[in-house]
């Protein structure tokens, strides 16, 4: 080394600083990558999902009923039925069975059964063997001794048997909806006109093998053929729980709960649990929890601080177990959209929350009574509301807002084996336009996770009334809807995701 040079000594402070800079830079880069991947994953979840298939058929009419299940061959199917008329066939009643995976038509039946103005609505159900039951719901099916339940083979659609209710006077305005159970029987709930012009709700039990009537019994009076039928829930022990609406009219009439014996149709017990004079929009829903052997009725009052009443009855005896009434659930202005039972036994009440928001425009002022005030505008907002109550005693566990602001729940479709897992249809009201977008989200247990969604924009005011009118969730989790929101009329179209 020359005399003018000196040894180079590393600066430990500088080396340490350089080391930590590289270390923290790597950490920051890693964190940024993780955040990017997480955000990308959430964007993928929110990305509109393309339909798996769309089946559109010409002709005048619409899909009026959907059912899903497994065919006798084990194929997952979607069965659609409804009003259809084309120049080529002239047939009106149409039942089509699709392969749920790829829209292949497995079979199709048509019947010269006029359905003018869609006033006769078919009701579809699939039994445990994969066969299809066709009934009639909500509107009269015409005067005379008509067939009201038909069983079709799930393999090829051939007719296996027909059933007509036991005559009781004229059968004008007759309707009947089949409900198959796990024991190979078919429960039938309907309304028929009896002697003297009176209408009665009835319940019957059929043998699914040949359609023979095991028994048929009367429930309570109905106002007319278009009144609400009774809701029937087959229980695992062989009986059924029947919720019969009131007759309707000027005075308040009671709702009835009955446990009906599957052996002979006798009433095991019955109770009145609320009174109602509105046959169209009762603020009432319920869940049946066989694990706790109880029926829970949920009754709301419309108002800014509405009470939510929960009443539990023992399924075996009909005795009241508990009743909870409070206004803490609050603001059920829209009543109850639906009620579902979660996998842990809690009860989920779906409703909507509305509130007003005031906005001040400080850059625009006006004079009033000699004073200057900023211009204000008031808007009303809405958001889906989820209320969770205990299935043990009805206590309020949680109240939270879900989805986006200014959205309305149109329907919640729950698969039979999925309990609280299902598809929730949301109608967007954000833009306050005549033609509003729609979307569907998939809920896990408790409704916390949201998977992929799709967005459709209706093409006219008629679409608001018809979409989503019908939807099913297949056993494997596919969503199928009837109609198209981009059309003003319902049309014959099935879309599956």
Image (cartoon, rainbow, N blue to C red):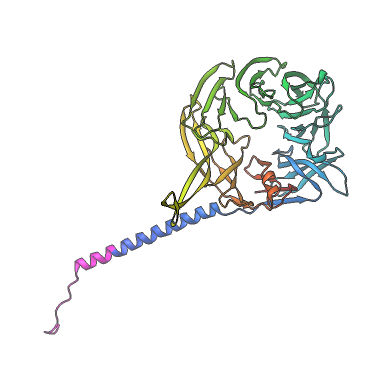
Horizontal and vertical percent position of residue 131: 75, 34
The quarter of the displayed image where residue 146 is located: top right
Q: Judge left or right: residue 427 versus residue 166.
A: left
Horizontal and vertical percent position of residue 387: 50, 34
In the image, what residue occupies the spot 19% across and 67% down? 12
In the image, what residue occupies the spot 50% across and 54% down? 41
The quarter of the displayed image where residue 150 is located: top right
Q: Which residues are magenta?
A: 1-20
Q: How many marks?
A: 0
Horizontal and vertical percent position of residue 154: 77, 37
Camera-nearest residue between 306 and 212: 306
Q: Judge left or right: residue 310 versus residue 231.
A: left
Residue 342 visible in the shown view: no
Camera-nearest residue between 317 and 311: 311
Residue 363 visible in the shown view: yes
The quarter of the displayed image where residue 73 is located: top right
In the image, what residue occupies the spot 60% across and 29% down? 284
Q: Judge left or right: residue 7 versus residue 263.
A: left
Tell me if residue 363 comes above or below residue 237 in the rendering.
Answer: below
Tell me if residue 130 comes above or below residue 11 in the rendering.
Answer: above
For the view shown, which residue lies furthest in the front direction? 370
* The N terminus - image quarter: bottom left
Judge whether residue 238 is colored magenta.
Answer: no
Horizontal and vertical percent position of residue 341: 56, 32
For the view shown, which residue lies furthest in the left direction? 3
């Amino acid at each position: 080394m020359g005399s003018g040079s000196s040894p180079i000594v590393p600066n430990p402070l500088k080396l340490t600083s350089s080391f930590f800079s590289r270390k923290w830079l790597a950490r920051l880069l890693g964190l940024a990558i993780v955040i990017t991947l997480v955000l990308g994953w959430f964007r993928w979840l929110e990305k509109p999902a393309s339909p798996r298939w769309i089946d559109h058929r010409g002709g005048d009419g619409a899909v009026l009923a959907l059912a899903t299940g497994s065919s006798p061959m084990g194929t997952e199917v979607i069965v659609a039925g409804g009003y259809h008329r084309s120049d080529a066939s002239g047939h009106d009643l149409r039942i089509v069975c699709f392969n749920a995976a790829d829209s292949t038509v497995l079979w199709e039946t048509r019947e010269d059964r006029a359905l003018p103005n869609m006033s006769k609505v078919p009701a579809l159900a699939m039994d445990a063997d994969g066969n299809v039951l066709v009934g009639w719901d909500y509107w009269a099916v015409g005067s005379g001794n008509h067939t009201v339940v038909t069983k079709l083979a799930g393999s090829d659609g051939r007719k296996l048997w027909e059933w007509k209710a036991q005559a009781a006077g004229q059968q004008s305005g007759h309707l009947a909806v089949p409900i198959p159970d796990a024991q190979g029987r078919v429960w039938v709930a309907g309304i028929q006109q009896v002697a003297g012009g009176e209408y009665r709700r009835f319940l019957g039990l059929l043998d699914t093998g040949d359609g023979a009537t095991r028994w048929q019994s009367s429930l309570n009076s109905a106002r007319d053929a278009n009144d609400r039928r009774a809701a029937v829930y087959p229980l695992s022990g062989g009986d059924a729980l029947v919720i019969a609406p009131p007759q309707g009219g000027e005075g308040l009439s009671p709702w009835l709960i009955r446990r009906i014996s599957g052996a002979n149709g006798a009433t095991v017990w019955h109770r009145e649990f609320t009174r109602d004079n509105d046959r169209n929009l009762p603020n009432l829903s319920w869940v049946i929890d066989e694990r706790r052997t109880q029926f829970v009725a949920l009754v709301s009052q419309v108002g800014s601080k509405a009470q939510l009443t929960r009443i539990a009855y023992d399924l075996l005896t009909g005795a009241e177990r508990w009743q909870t009434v409070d206004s803490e659930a609050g603001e059920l202005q829209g009543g109850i959209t639906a009620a579902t039972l979660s996998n842990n036994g809690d009860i989920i009440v779906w409703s909507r929350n509305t509130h007003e928001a005031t906005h001040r425009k400080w850059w625009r002022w006006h004079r009033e009574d000699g004073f200057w005030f900023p211009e204000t505008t008031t808007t009303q907002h809405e958001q889906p509301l989820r209320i969770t109550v205990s299935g043990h005693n009805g206590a309020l566990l949680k109240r939270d807002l879900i989805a986006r602001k200014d959205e309305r729940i149109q329907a919640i479709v729950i698969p039979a084996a999925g309990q609280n897992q299902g598809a929730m249809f949301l109608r967007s009201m954000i833009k306050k336009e005549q033609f509003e977008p729609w979307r569907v989200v998939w809920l896990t247990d408790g409704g916390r996770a949201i998977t992929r969604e799709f967005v459709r924009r209706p093409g006219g005011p008629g679409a608001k009334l018809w979409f989503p009118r019908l939807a099913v969730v297949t056993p494997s989790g596919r969503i199928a809807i009837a109609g198209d929101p981009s059309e003003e009329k319902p049309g014959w179209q099935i879309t599956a995701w």
